């Protein structure tokens, strides 16, 4: 694809090849402002790519380098997510400045970009993630409007919509073996959700992150039957994908 060079100085060396893609939204009023910030040495942030709403793709940091996009993060026990991942910033004002649907041209460019990145590195579907997956307490991006289902239909990432939605809802304040099993499932998928059996605020935050990615129609932090059925289905897919 046609990449527009826009080099950023905000990178370091990688210890190993990347095996993960982390998608973001820029969360700034304009794409121009986001691009300038991601190239500003004082900002100390970057990404490998920025995808504009019209589908233009800017190349900021070589994939062989460690860009600074994820910050304090966690997935499957790893905390240096920048070292493991290719970071893609998708222009959108975000929840703070007027969250809006991602235009088709932009999503088509993201899909093409992800496909190209995956020709160069071994990146399992289960490791195509949202910034909110790896930093659920701090981040909401790219958010519930990002079309993860479409991305999966194009062959990138996991998606599951099981028909059955068994079980009573679990919600904040609950405790017991059902909550323990929920937390264990979220941990197995990759989240930092150590099982305690207590449906505490950190658990609700992680359930919201899960929903933003995998059950975007209702992001409320309550593990209803549909949310839990999707988690179980995704665990099966992730196990098959490993
Ligand atoms: Zn982000």
Image: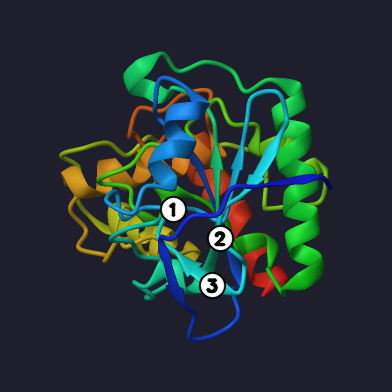
Q: Which quarter of the figure has residue 161?
A: top right
Residue at the spot of label 1: 46
**x%, y% of residue 146?**
58, 31
Residue at the location (63% across, 53% down)? 233
Residue at the spot of label 2: 61
Residue at the location (64% across, 24% down)? 53
In front: 150, or 5?
A: 5
163 displayed left or right of 28? right
Local secondary structure at mark 2: loop
**x%, y% of residue 142?**
49, 36
Crowdedness of circle 3 by 10 Å Cα count: few (<14), some, many (20+)?
many
Does residue 134 lie above or below 95 as drawn?
below
Q: CA distance from mark 2 to mark 1?
A: 8 Å
Asked if the beta carbon under badge 1 is closer than 8 A to the nearest atom of ligand 1, the reply is no
Say whether residue 81 is visible: yes
Residue farthest to the bottom, as pictured: 15
Q: Tag count in the figure?
A: 3
183 displayed left or right of 166? left
Does residue 223 lie above or below 5 as drawn?
above
168 displayed left or right of 214? left
């Amino acid at each position: 694809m046609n990449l527009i060079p826009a080099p950023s100085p905000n990178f370091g060396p990688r210890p190993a090849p990347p095996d993960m893609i982390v998608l973001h939204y820029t969360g700034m009023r304009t794409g121009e402002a986001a691009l300038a910030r991601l190239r500003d040495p004082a900002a100390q942030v970057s990404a490998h790519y920025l995808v504009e709403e019209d589908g233009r793709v800017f190349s900021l940091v070589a994939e062989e380098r460690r860009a600074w996009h994820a910050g304090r993060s966690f997935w499957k026990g790893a905390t240096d997510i920048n070292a493991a991942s290719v970071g893609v910033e998708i222009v959108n004002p975000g929840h703070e400045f007027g969250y809006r649907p991602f235009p088709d041209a932009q999503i088509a460019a993201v899909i093409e970009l992800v496909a190209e990145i995956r020709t160069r590195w071994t990146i399992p579907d289960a490791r195509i993630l949202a910034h909110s997956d790896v930093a659920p307490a701090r981040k909401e991006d790219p958010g519930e409007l990002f079309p993860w289902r479409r991305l999966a239909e194009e062959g990138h990432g996991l998606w599951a919509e099981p028909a059955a939605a068994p079980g009573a809802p679990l919600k904040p304040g609950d405790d017991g073996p059902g909550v323990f099993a929920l937390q264990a499932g979220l941990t197995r998928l990759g989240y930092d959700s150590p099982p305690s059996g207590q449906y505490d605020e950190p658990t609700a935050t992680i359930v919201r992150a899960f929903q933003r990615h995998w059950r975007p129609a209702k992001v409320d932090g309550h593990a209803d039957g549909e949310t839990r059925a999707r988690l179980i289905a995704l665990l099966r897919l992730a196990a098959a994908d490993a």
